Image (tube, rainbow, N blue to C red):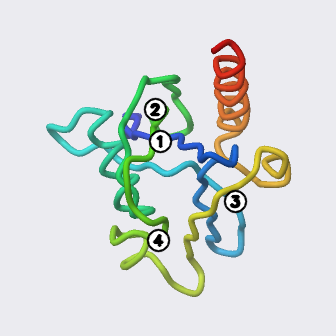
Amino acid sequence: MTLRPRAVGILFNSKNQVLLMLRRKNGKAYATLPGGGIEEGETPAEACAREVLEEVNLIVEVGPEVLVLDNLQNHEHYFLTRLVSGEMRLGDGPEGTIRQSGQNWYQPEWVSLEKLEEVNLVPEQARGLVRGLNDQSKSKEGNQ
Protein backbone atom coordinates (compact mmCIF):
# COMPACT_ATOMS: atom_id res chain seq x y z
CA MET A 1 0.00 0.00 0.00
CA THR A 2 1.38 3.39 -1.01
CA LEU A 3 1.26 6.01 1.72
CA ARG A 4 -0.20 9.39 0.78
CA PRO A 5 2.29 12.25 1.34
CA ARG A 6 1.00 15.04 3.58
CA ALA A 7 2.39 18.21 5.13
CA VAL A 8 1.29 19.53 8.52
CA GLY A 9 1.87 22.91 10.18
CA ILE A 10 2.28 23.52 13.91
CA LEU A 11 1.54 27.12 14.86
CA PHE A 12 1.62 28.69 18.32
CA ASN A 13 0.35 32.17 19.14
CA SER A 14 1.61 34.66 21.74
CA LYS A 15 -0.91 33.31 24.28
CA ASN A 16 0.77 29.90 24.27
CA GLN A 17 -2.07 28.32 22.27
CA VAL A 18 -1.75 25.94 19.35
CA LEU A 19 -3.88 26.17 16.22
CA LEU A 20 -6.10 23.12 15.69
CA MET A 21 -8.74 22.24 13.14
CA LEU A 22 -11.74 20.96 15.07
CA ARG A 23 -13.62 18.37 13.04
CA ARG A 24 -16.88 16.51 13.16
CA LYS A 25 -17.28 13.76 10.61
CA ASN A 26 -20.07 11.18 10.59
CA GLY A 27 -20.85 11.91 14.24
CA LYS A 28 -17.24 11.68 15.47
CA ALA A 29 -15.55 14.74 16.99
CA TYR A 30 -11.80 15.11 16.80
CA ALA A 31 -9.08 17.66 16.03
CA THR A 32 -6.08 17.80 13.73
CA LEU A 33 -3.22 20.15 13.09
CA PRO A 34 -3.75 22.09 9.83
CA GLY A 35 -2.36 20.29 6.81
CA GLY A 36 -3.09 18.19 3.78
CA GLY A 37 -1.83 16.47 0.69
CA ILE A 38 1.41 17.33 -1.07
CA GLU A 39 0.76 18.07 -4.73
CA GLU A 40 2.98 16.84 -7.55
CA GLY A 41 6.04 19.06 -7.97
CA GLU A 42 5.57 20.63 -4.54
CA THR A 43 7.98 20.29 -1.63
CA PRO A 44 6.59 19.31 1.78
CA ALA A 45 7.38 22.82 3.09
CA GLU A 46 5.54 24.46 0.17
CA ALA A 47 2.56 22.18 0.76
CA CYS A 48 2.55 23.09 4.44
CA ALA A 49 2.32 26.83 3.70
CA ARG A 50 -0.39 26.28 1.05
CA GLU A 51 -2.47 23.98 3.23
CA VAL A 52 -2.39 26.32 6.24
CA LEU A 53 -3.54 29.18 3.99
CA GLU A 54 -6.30 27.07 2.41
CA GLU A 55 -7.56 25.71 5.73
CA VAL A 56 -7.30 28.67 8.11
CA ASN A 57 -6.58 31.77 5.98
CA LEU A 58 -3.15 32.41 7.55
CA ILE A 59 0.13 33.07 5.78
CA VAL A 60 2.93 31.31 7.64
CA GLU A 61 6.67 31.06 7.38
CA VAL A 62 7.57 27.39 7.37
CA GLY A 63 10.39 26.57 9.76
CA PRO A 64 12.16 23.33 10.55
CA GLU A 65 10.72 19.92 9.85
CA VAL A 66 10.25 18.44 13.32
CA LEU A 67 8.80 15.00 12.58
CA VAL A 68 8.19 12.57 9.73
CA LEU A 69 5.50 10.06 10.61
CA ASP A 70 3.98 7.10 8.79
CA ASN A 71 0.45 7.03 10.12
CA LEU A 72 -2.25 4.69 8.76
CA GLN A 73 -2.46 5.64 5.09
CA ASN A 74 -0.32 8.81 5.32
CA HIS A 75 3.38 9.71 5.20
CA GLU A 76 3.29 13.00 7.14
CA HIS A 77 5.86 15.81 7.33
CA TYR A 78 5.38 18.06 10.40
CA PHE A 79 6.77 21.60 10.35
CA LEU A 80 7.02 24.29 12.99
CA THR A 81 5.56 27.46 11.48
CA ARG A 82 5.45 31.16 12.36
CA LEU A 83 2.55 33.50 11.64
CA VAL A 84 3.29 36.15 9.02
CA SER A 85 -0.18 37.61 8.39
CA GLY A 86 -3.88 36.92 8.07
CA GLU A 87 -6.97 36.68 10.19
CA MET A 88 -7.84 33.18 11.33
CA ARG A 89 -11.06 31.87 9.84
CA LEU A 90 -12.08 28.86 7.81
CA GLY A 91 -10.13 29.32 4.59
CA ASP A 92 -11.20 29.17 0.98
CA GLY A 93 -9.91 25.64 0.41
CA PRO A 94 -12.11 22.55 0.16
CA GLU A 95 -12.62 22.46 3.94
CA GLY A 96 -14.54 25.73 3.79
CA THR A 97 -16.40 25.13 0.56
CA ILE A 98 -16.79 21.61 -0.82
CA ARG A 99 -16.50 19.51 2.34
CA GLN A 100 -18.55 21.59 4.79
CA SER A 101 -21.95 19.97 5.46
CA GLY A 102 -24.22 18.88 8.29
CA GLN A 103 -22.33 15.60 8.67
CA ASN A 104 -18.86 17.00 8.04
CA TRP A 105 -17.64 20.32 9.43
CA TYR A 106 -14.39 22.09 10.14
CA GLN A 107 -13.67 24.87 12.64
CA PRO A 108 -10.21 26.37 13.26
CA GLU A 109 -9.55 27.22 16.89
CA TRP A 110 -6.69 28.29 19.15
CA VAL A 111 -6.44 25.76 21.98
CA SER A 112 -4.47 26.31 25.18
CA LEU A 113 -1.98 23.64 26.11
CA GLU A 114 -3.91 23.13 29.35
CA LYS A 115 -7.02 22.20 27.32
CA LEU A 116 -5.06 20.07 24.86
CA GLU A 117 -5.64 16.97 27.02
CA GLU A 118 -9.42 17.42 26.62
CA VAL A 119 -9.23 17.40 22.82
CA ASN A 120 -9.31 14.20 20.75
CA LEU A 121 -6.21 15.18 18.75
CA VAL A 122 -5.25 12.79 15.97
CA PRO A 123 -2.87 11.25 15.36
CA GLU A 124 -1.98 10.49 18.98
CA GLN A 125 1.67 11.41 18.41
CA ALA A 126 0.69 15.03 17.65
CA ARG A 127 -0.13 15.79 21.30
CA GLY A 128 3.35 14.84 22.53
CA LEU A 129 4.96 16.68 19.63
CA VAL A 130 3.05 19.90 20.39
CA ARG A 131 3.89 19.69 24.10
CA GLY A 132 7.57 19.01 23.38
CA LEU A 133 7.87 21.91 20.95
CA ASN A 134 6.19 24.25 23.41
CA ASP A 135 8.55 23.14 26.19
CA GLN A 136 11.55 23.75 23.90
CA SER A 137 10.23 27.20 23.04
CA LYS A 138 9.82 28.11 26.71
CA SER A 139 13.31 26.82 27.47
CA LYS A 140 14.84 28.97 24.71
CA GLU A 141 12.97 32.08 25.92
CA GLY A 142 14.20 31.50 29.47
CA ASN A 143 17.82 31.27 28.29
CA GLN A 144 17.81 34.57 26.41
Q: Is residue 54 left or right of residue 124?
A: left
Mark closer to the chain start, 2 or 4 = 2
Residue marked by disc 2: 79
Q: Amino acid at mark 3?
A: Tyr
Mark closer to the chain start, 3 or 2 = 3
Q: Amino acid at mark 4?
A: Leu
Q: Amino acid at mark 1?
A: Gly
Residue marked by disc 1: 9
Whole-Å distance between the Cαs marked 1 and 3? 17 Å
Residue marked by disc 4: 90
Q: Amino acid at mark 2?
A: Phe
> Are the residues at dot 1 and dot 3 in contact (C-beta closer than 8 Å)?
no
Whole-Å distance between the Cαs marked 3 and 2? 21 Å
Q: Is residue 35 left or right of residue 18?
A: left
Q: Is residue 117 left or right of residue 84?
A: right
Mark 3 or mark 4, which is nearer to you? 4
Numbered circle sitting on residue 30: 3
